[in-house]
Amino acid sequence: QLRLVNNMIDITKIDSGFYDLGLQNLDIVRVVENITMSVSDYIRSKSVNLIFDTDFEERIIAFDPDSIERIMLNLLSNAVKFSKEGGTIHVNMHNTEEEVIVSVRDTGIGIPEDKKELIFDRFRQVDKSLTRNHEGSGIGLALVKSLVGMHGGSISVQSDHGIGTIFIFSLPAKTTQDEKVPPAEKKPKPNIEKIHLEFSDIYSIN
């Protein structure tokens, strides 16, 4: 219930224009890697492998670290939830002149071709037989899409049913002109309660 209420509050704020991003000029590589590694023990406890890789070492861009954390936790949660034991989740980062691209790929159950357009819709889940008894509000990915969009980025999904899924989101490689010194960057801690709260499920449609 708390998860649903928080999601609804955030969606309402976004729709009404009252959700403010706390943009800071930070190293996106460090932040994404720290978030990913903070949940590595949890993911491996599910007998799923986790691999982080990047083709660049540092890129300072403007983003809201709290929103990026929420985006990554949602994508990682969906990946581990629908991966079989012995599966692998790959988090990759790529760098272009104009944007930073982050992908989260799993070797899980995948998404049927005719359901791909529905997964970012609110309160939509893609096939109840695939949820494996996991319950959720069905708005986790709607939030992810909104948060990415607020950064001026985009998100897409590629999937082969029964083989795996990859979510790809991009962020513009821009910095803010705000001269205020951002607070010190903190490494996320492996908080299991927070992981359970942030992790959402999507693959089922009522």
Image (spheres, grey):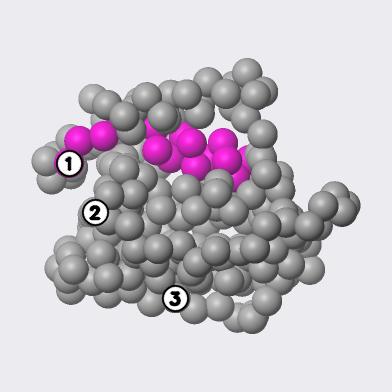
- Residue type at tag 1: His
Instruction: Look at the numbered discs 1 and 3 and tell me whether their residues touch, using CB distance below 8 Å.
Output: no
Quarter holding the C terminus is: top left
Marked residue nearer the N-terminal end (2 or 3): 3
Residue 35 versus residue 3 in the image, above or below: below
161 sits to left or right of 157: left
What range of the chain is rendered magenta?
A: 134-149
Per the rendering, the mark at residue 123 is none
Q: Amino acid at mark 2?
A: Lys
- Chief secondary structure of the magenta span? helix
Q: Earlier in the sequence, mark 2 or mark 1?
A: 2
Q: Measured along the vertical axis of the image, is residue 16 above or below residue 111?
A: above
Vertical side of 179 occupied by 122: above or below: above
- Reading the image, the residue beneath label 2 is 81
CA neighbours of label 1 inside 10 A, class few (<14), some (14 to 19), many (20+): some
Classify mark 3: residues with Cα within 10 Å, few (<14), some (14-19) or many (20+).
Answer: some
Q: Is residue 143 magenta?
A: yes
Q: Which mark is residue 134?
A: 1
Q: Quadrant of residue 200?
A: top left
**Three-letter code for the amino acid on which mark 3 is drawn:** Phe
Question: In the rendered view, does 84 fall on the left or right side of 92?
Answer: left
Label 2 with label 1: CB-CB less than 8 Å = yes
Q: Residue at x 65, y 63 (%)?
A: 184
Task: Residue under label 3, please give it.
Answer: 52
Q: Is residue 88 magenta?
A: no
Instruction: Report the Cα–Cα distance between label 2 and label 1.
Output: 8 Å
The quarter holding residue 179 reads bottom right
Q: Nearer the viewer, residue 164 or 2?
A: 2
Residue 13 coordinates in the image, percent (x, y): 57, 23
